[in-house]
Image: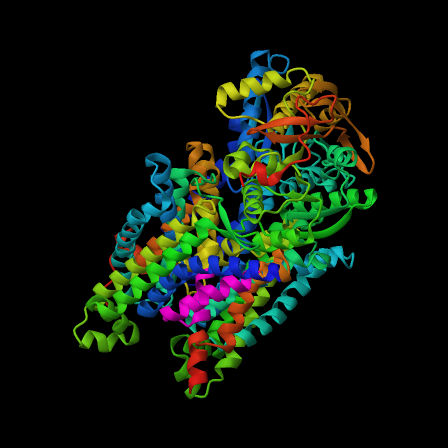
Amino acid sequence: MTKRNLALVILGIVFLVFPLVVRSDYYQHLLILAFIWVLIGSSWNLLAGYTGQVSFGHAMFFGVGAYTAGIFVTKLGISAWWGMMFGGIVAMLIGLFVGWVCFRLRGPYFALATLAGGEIFRLIATNWESLTEGMVGILIIQTFRSKLPYYYLALLLAFACVYVMHLIMKSKWGYYFVSIREDQDAAESLGINTTLYKNVSLLASSFFTGMAGAFYMNYMAFIDPEVVFSLHYISIMAILVGIVGGVGTIMGPAVGAFVMVGVQETFRSAFFGLAPKWISQGHAMAFGLLVVFAIMFLANGIVGDWSKIKRYVFRIKPSTI
Amino acid sequence: MKKVKILIGLVLAVAVIFSLWPSFSMAADTVEVGIVLPLTGPQAKFGEVEKLSFDLALEEINTAGGINGKTLELLIEDDTGRPDVGRSVVEKLITKDKVVMLGGGYSSSVTYAVAGVCQQNAMPFLVNTGSADKITGSGWDWIFRLNPPVSHYADAVKTLLAEKVKPKTVAILYENSLFGTKGAKSFQKICDNAAYKVLLKQGYEHGGIDYKPVLTQIKRLNPDIVYMVSYIMDASLLMKQARELKLTPKMFVGGAAGFTLPEFVDNAGKASDKVISATLWHQVLPFPGAMDYYNKFVAKHKRPTEYHGAEAYAACYVIADILKRAKSYKNTDIKKALSKTDMMTVFGPVKFTTWGKLKNQNIAGTYVVQWLDGKLELVWPTKHATKKFNYPVNWLKVWGY
Amino acid sequence: MDVFIQTLVAGILIGGIYCLIGIGMSLIMGVMGIINLAHGQLMMVAMYITFVLSAYMHVDPYFSLIVAMPGLFLLGCFLQKYLLNPLMKKESILPENQVLMTVGMGMVLAEICRFIFTSDYKTVKTSYGGQAFFIGNISFNLPMCIAFIFAIVITVVLFWFLAKTDTGRSIRATAQDKEAATLMGVNSTRITIITFGLGSALVASAGSLLIPIFYLFPDIGGPFTLKAFVICILGGLGSTVGAIFGGLTLGIAESLGATYIGMGYKDMVGFLIFVIVLVFLPGGLVGLKRLIKS
């Protein structure tokens, strides 16, 4: 077993054992949040990092997944857990539509179109009160009092997502995606059906993000348009998670998710109570600085530029070949 | 391999430390109550007035002996105006800080989301501002509310309009938040019951720059009353732009919130004059300590306070009273003490009963205030009023045309 | 009929300010090919400068343009030179790095202002703040009319600058074809710095002109950045003339949407137009004009 795989196995064991050792609901909650972001970040990364279609509107899929689960409760009277299965599927359908509209656009234009898409969905959710309850939001009763079932479910989802991404990228699809990212026209001229594969990437991406949204509905038990369709807190956060962690890597978004959730909570709680109170508003500033720093020096994220980090931080010289 | 072992060791050590951490912060001589308020974000001004009022009451309570000798401590956490943050913060207060009860709750949507968490965790929650009816109308027995529900906010306005203004037509404008939407719905019900025709009812996204399109429509429809439910800045902009358009109904009525803050008169200037609003409190009301509270606050913070502050101040005293009476700090005993509450505060009498479909609700009165000469004066009901209700109003003259 | 004219007037007046926001972004997009997602935050900085001048030195917002515009010009140059230009040389997987850098920049700017000024709403009160004059039954908000006039003046000066001065022509050349311009002796690095500064100065003017009729808080930037794109796309990327049409069109569309569809849907109108134009009219209004001509 390679060193890397061993580290991953150990990490997996740590995660499995964590909630049994650390019984505090609060820290379990933080990890669950991190797992949700692993889902969203990895999905975004598939579309943006690997396929080169930088989406600024991933909140669309998250919110649609969340509302699917929520509407199952409010309109159909059935448990929101059914929404988990359908949340991903509905998000995929939305993804198809978004792809049809937006894939004719390239680069920054695609980004802007998805950004507008996210906002349009938010406005629809706010105004279509008969379907979504508008700003009142949807509140359900959590199925489990303890956080453990949610923790393990989130862990399972996150693990499954990262593994699926790994499988996809190892397959022929992975090559197609990267070739689209590097030069879409060249890929097309080589006979790769770029439109098809962009959509495949989008479907996988929207599916997992939709699942994350449905899980969020089940776990947080409250959603409203501002929360789940948020440009700032969902779409842009997904991008930050990807960038800081490392676009175009499998583990990057996972690392990014933990870093971002960690930074956010560390600041919001004023370094867990150790720092002066005014620091708590600094998390947004920390994010901003982190992004600027990451793009300047670690353009490929923590994982992508790990060799660079090793060199500068740990002073590990690259072995001579 | 060695590095990996060190890493695992570190992770486990950190995990162990974190799981033990909470036990370090428990002191024996204090009683901790969690308070959830928007300290940052768009509602920060309201959160600030409430926090300062809580602090004021806390100081007085602890100087007077605290809770049977123990110091009352308020852990005030910031919900940033977002329901998901509110929920996380409250979960932290419940599971990590192990507070004995919860207070606060400003925004309706945050309060509702937070109440859900409290109900599930059997944590007593004394709401003092969140006004959506749902909060005490969902059959949750752990949730108690000091302030009246938004469906009753306009009760006093209703009688004032019926007796003094006798309108025939109404236009309703509201921010499409939970508070605004519910407030508008309640007012519409009032109009339907009184046979006032609602000519227009429109929601808007807060933060808009230009309300002239909808105000122009309203001008064309020429209603007798324009009723608005807004938070701070929108309220000022609406009145400023109404003035610019020379929109002159018989009366402008605010549905509380943004219309009673000093920021309203600061920003709207002349356009705020003679505007009336529903309110839940005024310092001239004959509740013991009301005027004292007002004066103390102004002296300390150099700015006026209003009903939000009074709610917080009174809530703190109610919390102290409950904790003094409670047999123990177990949640069931606190709940029992809450339900037996029967006291007078600066906000008025506090007693939790069933009010219509609402549970554990305090039946509080509502009043009408009017901005006269830059000051918010109580004008209705007449038995409490200190100034006469200024009506009819020659708006063009008031606005300096 | 009155309602329609009033709506139109409101839309045109706000459109003037939108134009200034849009032209700035259009220039930056045309020359550098990047979307400046910090555009709204730059406007915010200018508004805070105006606020400080007004609150502490009682300078009228219109006079503070003299400080805000050059100030933001320098800030823009600084940001381009030290944060954005270096990225052009870096190897990275995603070409959108510059765009994402502007996201980071915007966040930091907003947080710095929040730290200094808190999240409180700030206003600048002027004696003419809420004044309106009437032509017939139609009300014209005085500060907005003044803002509109300033917008026209600034736009005219900008066009003169772009058409008649060396630097201006270099900017246009770089926007048309960066490599050819470099071959002709244009220092493209210097031009990108100046352009970003210029774009910032323009959006700064919009901010100073806006503050008397609106209010200020650290998160004000976001929605305006979004409006800026819609304007640019609507008008045709890189086209300053297009941005003018885009700004006016957006202002009028929003106003009409608010009156005839409903205020809750006002923002949606902008986004829908945006997506429709992006998809069906990639050249924007200017492209449409060319299409019609051909």
Using the rendered view, name the quadrant where residue C201 is placed. bottom left
* Residue name at image x 59 percent, y 11 percent: B64
Using the rendered view, name the quadrant where residue C217 is placed. top left
Compared with B143, B240 (above or below) is: below
| B3 relative to B46 in the view: left or right | left
Q: Report the colour scheme.
A: rainbow
Question: Does residue B310 appear anywhere in the picture?
Answer: yes
Compared with A160, C75 (above or below) is: above
Q: Is residue A47 magenta?
A: no
Residue A309 percent coordinates (x, y): 31, 55
Quadrant the C terminus of chain C occupies: bottom left
| B144 relative to B303 in the view: left or right | right
Residue B156 percent coordinates (x, y): 74, 32
Using the rendered view, name the quadrant where residue A308 is placed. bottom left
The number of callouts visible is: 0
Name the foreground residue: B278 vs A290.
B278
Q: Which residues are magenta?
A: C227-255
Name the foreground residue: B384 vs C52.
B384
Most common secondary structure along the magenta stretch:
helix
Q: Is residue C239 magenta?
A: yes
Quadrant the N terminus of chain C occupies: bottom right
Question: Does residue C38 appear anywhere in the picture?
Answer: no
Residue C228 percent coordinates (x, y): 43, 61
Compared with C235, A39 (above or below) is: above
Residue B104 percent coordinates (x, y): 62, 32
| Extreme-left residue of the structure | C185
| A239 relative to B60 in the view: left or right | left
* Residue name at image x 47 percent, y 64 percent: C248
Compared with C178, A153 (above or below) is: above
Name the foreground residue: B27 vs C44.
C44
